Image (spheres, rainbow, N blue to C red):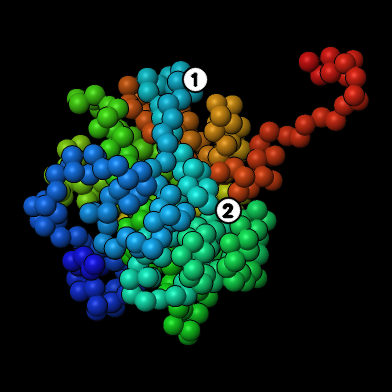
Amino acid sequence: MNKPFTYQCSICGKKYAPNEITYTCYHDGGNLDVLLDYAAIQERYQPDDITSRAETSLWRYLPLIPVAAPADAEHTPLYAVGWTPTYELPTLAKKHGLHNLWLKDESANPTASFKDRASAILVARAKQIGADTIVTASTGNAGAALAGMAAAVGHKAVIFAPKTAPVAKITQLLVFGAQVMLVDGNYDDAVKLAVSAANEFGWYCRNTGYNPFTLEGKKTAGFEIWEWALKTLPAHSKALTVFVSVGDGNIISGVHKGFKDLVKLGWMQQMPRIIGVQAEGSAAIANAFNAKTEEITPVHATTMADSISVDMPSDGIRALRAATETGGRYVIVKDEQIYAAIAELGRVGIFAEPAGATAYAGLVEAIAQGSVAADDPVLVLNTGSGLKDVKAAMKSVGEAPIIAPTLEAVKEKL
């Protein structure tokens, strides 16, 4: 079933019919937003029609997603994406002087990261348009998500990753049967190569931001946050503040798109405040935010948080607007703060990869800067499992001591 929608350039505002364009605006190369037929959705559905559904995956929100659900994939990992848990963190809330603190844990997705959301929708779109080979550039998580989702439905995945990507992430790609090519360059080089290969071989390109359906997958996290907030926050509480780590900008843009869709439908009365967090060594979007401009200048990314290590963000303008249009801001943290955040989250049972821990590090920094009040309800988004980068995890906590097999040796360490 084809659902009616329109593309609109996020820069110039030009609109396109679905059959006119596939990736970015012909006029200025801007990323495309998918505009749903909001009037038709309003006429057919009420919020209760969504929140009462039994489906516990992102397909719960199918009426708000511009693809058809692949019926032949119902009992595959494609239908296990999303509906991730949200944990209350009272110990950390008390430590930092907050009344309420929660963490939404995306490591519960099938390939252990937020990127499964985009890949599930991309694979569904590929099936819809008859594309059986999908290509993407990735530092690991997006590639693993594509490889896993493609494998679930028998599609071919081709992944270009920088040769410096963590071994655990590359291993995932290979185990899922993707064709993997390690690029002797950085993430930005891999992005360009994926686009060139898609054009040369006729593959469907999943590149983050470049393909408008990546945003449509990631916005489902915004839907889940909305539904969770309806059930959790008092009706007249302060607006929720959401902390999101930012690299190329597509996750924060996706969460914002989910909220915007709900506002356009009249289903969300209070837009959450979104705060983006970037590593000091990869802060192109934060730099632009602080300069009060939408002109984003590339950086030479050096952070250890590989998932958000980007020279030139592919979705920078929309990522900026996610903060500016919600009364949010950007926070910059050092790698040392990210390591500390990994360890601190671990002590309350959350094993986050560096990019996921960056959001929490940003919360701690924002509190220190006075940007978060004690009575602000706060939700931190953990984007991936710490098992994605065990080397970084080990550095955050140190190695376990080796002892003699005696009680005396044990007592010395107590």
Q: Mark 1 = which residue?
A: 91
**Identity, as a three-letter code, of the amino acid under mark 2:** Asp
**Residue 125 place in picture, x, y as percent:** 35, 67
Residue 396: give x, y in percent of width and height.
Answer: 66, 36
User: Quick one: 148 or 163, which is closer to the camera?
Assistant: 148
The answer to which of marks 2 and 1 sits earlier in the sequence is 1
x and y, in percent, of residue 132 in the image? 44, 75
Tell me, yes or no, if residue 173 can be seen here: no
Residue drawn at x 59%, y 66% is 177
Which residue is rendered at x = 18% and y = 66% of the image?
4
In x, y percent, where is residue 348?
55, 26
At label 1, counting other C-alpha atoms closer than 10 Å, the crowd grade (few under 14, some 14-19, many 20 or more) is few
Which residue is found at the position 24% from the left and 73% from the top?
18
Q: Which residue is mark 2?
A: 306
Seen at 56% across and 44% down, the residue is 385
Which amino acid type is marked by label 1? Answer: Thr
Cα–Cα gap, marks 2 and 1? 29 Å
Image: 227 above or below 291? above
